[in-house]
Image (cartoon, grey):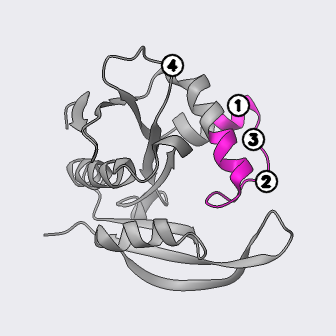
Amino acid sequence: MDFPIEAKLKDGTPIQLALADHRDSEPLRRLFQTIIEEGASYPHDRLPGQADFMAYWFTGTSTIVAYQQGSQRGADLLGAFYLKPNWPGRARHVANAGFIVAPQWRNKGLGWLLGAVMLQYATELGYRSVIFNLVFAENQVARRLWRKLGFSELAVLPGAVLKNDRTYQDAIIMWKSLLP
């Protein structure tokens, strides 16, 4: 897959998807902090330190970022995803991915576009399937999106996620084969 990729959202907004580099680190960190504070999709209870953040988003992963076409790189990040092996060695062909979309860019088709690009990219990189280890059960938007992109819900992890209000919610393991 050749990056950058130019695409349009449902409302016609032109965007560009690119492989992340050093210019994207701070905008990605700011957006990740917003997502963590929402508490609806990532298990982190606080923003990781710089080294842990870089390891999570950049070490051993392919990270893709989305910007409006024509905007300065490193400015207003619309969303991103990482793609990496879920396990090492003999199970390295099973991918894992994580997604974030800026609140003001939700419900415009960006999540679907990022997911579709990830599936194509994962296939081209030789992965045989993709697994999401921890989809928050109450995140119905994400669950609906992943089902629309062909993922199955494999298992429920009861009470796996501590919510911001100190109650617990279930998490779902979702999976999709990339084989023809």
Marks 3/1: CA–CA distance: 11 Å
Q: Which residues are magenta?
A: 32-53
Q: CA distance from mark 3 to mark 2?
A: 7 Å
| Residue type of the residue flagged with mark 2 | Asp
CB contact under 8 Å: marks 3 and 4 = no
User: Residue 144: x, y in percent?
Assistant: 41, 72
Check disc 2 and report its element: helix, strand or loop. Answer: loop
Residue type (three-letter) at the residue carrying disc 3: Leu
Give the amino acid at mark 4.
Ala
Let me know if residue 33 is in the magenta part: yes
Crowding at dot 2, Cα within 10 Å, few <14 / some 14-19 / many 20+, comes out as some
Disc count in the image? 4
Residue under the point 45% across and 45% down: 81
Q: Which residue is mark 1?
A: 51
Secondary structure under tag 3 reads loop
- Mark 2 lies on residue: 45
Q: Residues within 10 Å of mark 4 (few under 14, many from 20)?
A: some
Q: Find disc 3 in the rendering and name its residue.
A: 47
Between discs 1 and 4, the one toward the N terminus = 1
Pinpoint residue 126: horizontal percent, then vertical percent: 24, 53
Label at residue 75 = 4
Label 4: element kind: loop
